[in-house]
Image (cartoon, rainbow, N blue to C red):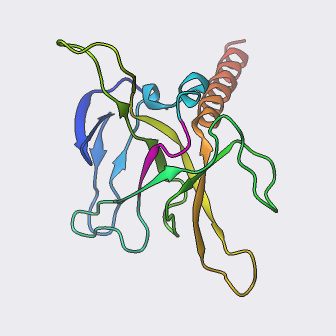
Amino acid sequence: MFHPPQKPVLYCAYRLEVEHSTATGEGSMVVTQIGYELLADADMLAKIDVCDLVALPGYPDFYDRNGNRPIMRMGTIASDPESDYCDLGMRPARRIAYEAFSSAGSSGSPVFALAKGMRTGAGLSGGYFRDFCLLGVNAGHLRGRDEMDPSHAGISYCYKSTCIVEAIKDAEHGAGQIISEQSK
């Protein structure tokens, strides 16, 4: 589950709060836990716009094997985050489309909306600022429309972070029910 952060880590020029980070040897991946406070709720999603910048770290076949580090892909949001993106043949779901190349090994990767605007303070006032947040979890990418063009269409999609928040709440609720039933 998500826990309060214990130490800050600089990761791709953005400060993430992590509980711990481990690498267990040759060929293993680095595990990083993301704080609950980074999950974009419905209010935060309402502040995210088409063409805002996104970044997704991942471990496709060409990840950095020197230190077992992910590569970072960047792109822009391609669909309205307040709507639920649905292409031909997709079942309705809470998705956001973004223009970036995800590939095998990127499924389940976090998709971050990068900070936007200027933070005020120390003599600065006014303006707009939206902080860095977890937009969602990468779920795949689109391909060409016909059999003659099976290539990556340049559009990927993620499930919204609100799905993660609901899953956590459901798990906590279910765990609470199990505990109360066991204490009877």
Q: Is residue 35 above or below residue 100?
A: above
Residue 47 place in picture, x, y as percent: 53, 28
Image: 125 above or below 165:
above
Q: Quadrant of residue 16?
A: top left
Residue sitting farthest toward the front: 126
User: What residue is shown at x 82% (from left), y 62% (from top)?
Assistant: 89
Q: Against 3, is 99 above or below?
A: below
The residue depicted at 69 percent of the width and 15 percent of the height is 180
Horizontal arrangement in the rendering, residue 134 relative to residue 29 (left or right)? right
Residue nearest the observer in this picture, 111 or 66: 111
**From the viewer's perspective, is 11 left or right of 59?**
left
Give the quadrant of the C terminus: top right
Of residue 79 and residue 156, the one placed in the foreground of this image is 79
The magenta segment: 49-57
Q: Is residue 99 magenta?
A: no
Is 54 covered by the magenta stretch? yes
- Residue 9 is situated, as x and y percent measured from the top left of the image, at 23, 38
Viewer-proximal residue, 158 or 5? 158
- Side (left or right) of 125 relative to 150: left
Q: How far across and how far down the image is residue 166, in percent?
A: 65, 29
